[in-house]
Amino acid sequence: MRKDTAPSRSAVGRPADGFTLIELLVVIAIIALLMGILLPSLARAREQARKVACLSNLRQMGVALQAYLIDSEYRLPPSSCRCEDPNGHWLRILTGYTQEQLLFRCPSDRARNFVDWDKPLQDQEDVRYSSFAVNALLDPIHFRYGARSNRYNDVNQIRRAMYCIWISEAPDTENFNLADHIHPESWEGAEQYARQFVAWDRHKGTSNYLFADGHAENLTFEQTYAWPHTCYWYPEAAPKWPDTP
C-alpha cells in the first residue's frame, strides 16, 4: 500500500520567490542615487546640444552672409532701425541665401512671444523678431560716422572684420520686442550696463557671436568687451577701443 508522505519544508515552509521590503528599498535607493548622478549630466548634455545648435545656426548665417555680400557690393543688410518694412529684416534677407533653414530662435531662448512670419506683422504686437540682434554701428546709416552714410556698412572698410561683431544674442526681455539691433556706442565702457543688451550668459556663462567676416564663435562677454583691453564692437578700431574724441 502507498504511504502518504508529508510535504517537505521546501514545499510549504519557504516563502515564494520575490523581493523583501528591505531589498526593494535598497533597489529604490540605488536608482535614486544613479538618477541624482545622471540627471545633472543629462542637463549639461542638453544645454551643450542647444549651444552647438545655436552656434551652427550662426555659422549658416555666416555662409548666407558671404553669398549676400557678393550681390550687395559687400554692404551688410540693414537692421529695422533703417528699414521701414519689417519684412526687410536682415535674417529674412539671409534666409534667401542658404539652402538650410535659418533659426529665428535660439534653442536656449526661453521667451515665448516670437513673431509669426506667416501672419501680417501689423497684426502682431509686442513680439520678438528673433533671438539675435545686429550691431547698429554697421548699419547703412549711423550718425556716429556721418548723417548720410556709414562707410563701415561696407565690410571692406572695417578695420579688421574678423574681430568686429555683427550679430550677438539678444536677451529675452521686453526691451527686445520689435527690435533687432543694439547700440554699443551707448555703453561708454560700462561693462555691467552693456550686459543688459546681450544674452551674455545664455549658454552657461557664454554667448554665440557672428563676426563681420562671416565666422562664428562662442565667447564670454569679457572676451568681447573689457575696458581698457578688448573691444570687438567698434568697426573703426576692433579688436581695440576707438580713440577718445
Image (spheres, rainbow, N blue to C red):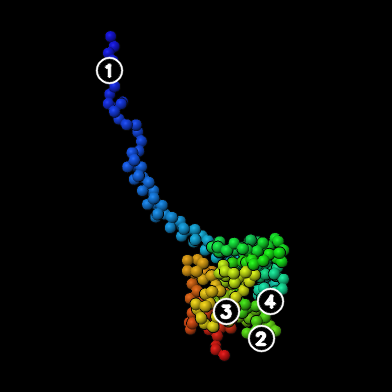
| Pointer 4 or 1: first along the chain | 1
| Pointer 3 or 1: first along the chain | 1
Residue 108 position in % (x across, y down) = 54, 63
- Disc 1 marks a residue whose amino acid type is Thr
Instruction: Give the Cα distance between marks 1 and 2.
Output: 111 Å
Instruction: Give the Cα distance between marks 4 and 1.
Output: 101 Å
* Residue at mark 3: 184
Does the residue at mark 3 contact the one at mark 1 (Cβ under 8 Å)?
A: no
In this rendering, is residue 159 above or below 129? below
Q: Residue at x 37, y 46 (%)?
A: 28
Instruction: Give the side of residue 62 with respect to residue 122, left or right.
Output: left
Categorize mark 1 by other alpha carbons within 10 Å: few (<14), some (14-19), many (20+). Answer: few
Residue 225 position in % (x across, y down) = 51, 78
Disc number for residue 82: 4
Q: Nearer the viewer, residue 126 or 157?
A: 126
Does the residue at mark 2 contact the one at mark 3 (Cβ under 8 Å)?
A: no
Q: Residue at x 56, y 83 (%)?
A: 237
- Disc 3 marks a residue whose amino acid type is Pro
Instruction: Give the Cα distance between marks 4 and 2.
Output: 14 Å
* Residue at mark 2: 146
Categorize mark 4 by other alpha carbons within 10 Å: few (<14), some (14-19), many (20+). Answer: some
| Quadrant position of residue 115 | bottom right
Q: Residue at x 58, y 83 (%)?
A: 236
Under tag 4, what secondary structure?
Answer: helix
Under tag 1, what secondary structure?
Answer: loop
Disc number for residue 5: 1
- Disc 4 marks a residue whose amino acid type is Arg
Does the residue at mark 1 contact the one at mark 2 (Cβ under 8 Å)?
A: no
In this rendering, is residue 148 above or below 73? below
In this rendering, is residue 39 above or below 202? above
- Disc 2 marks a residue whose amino acid type is Gly
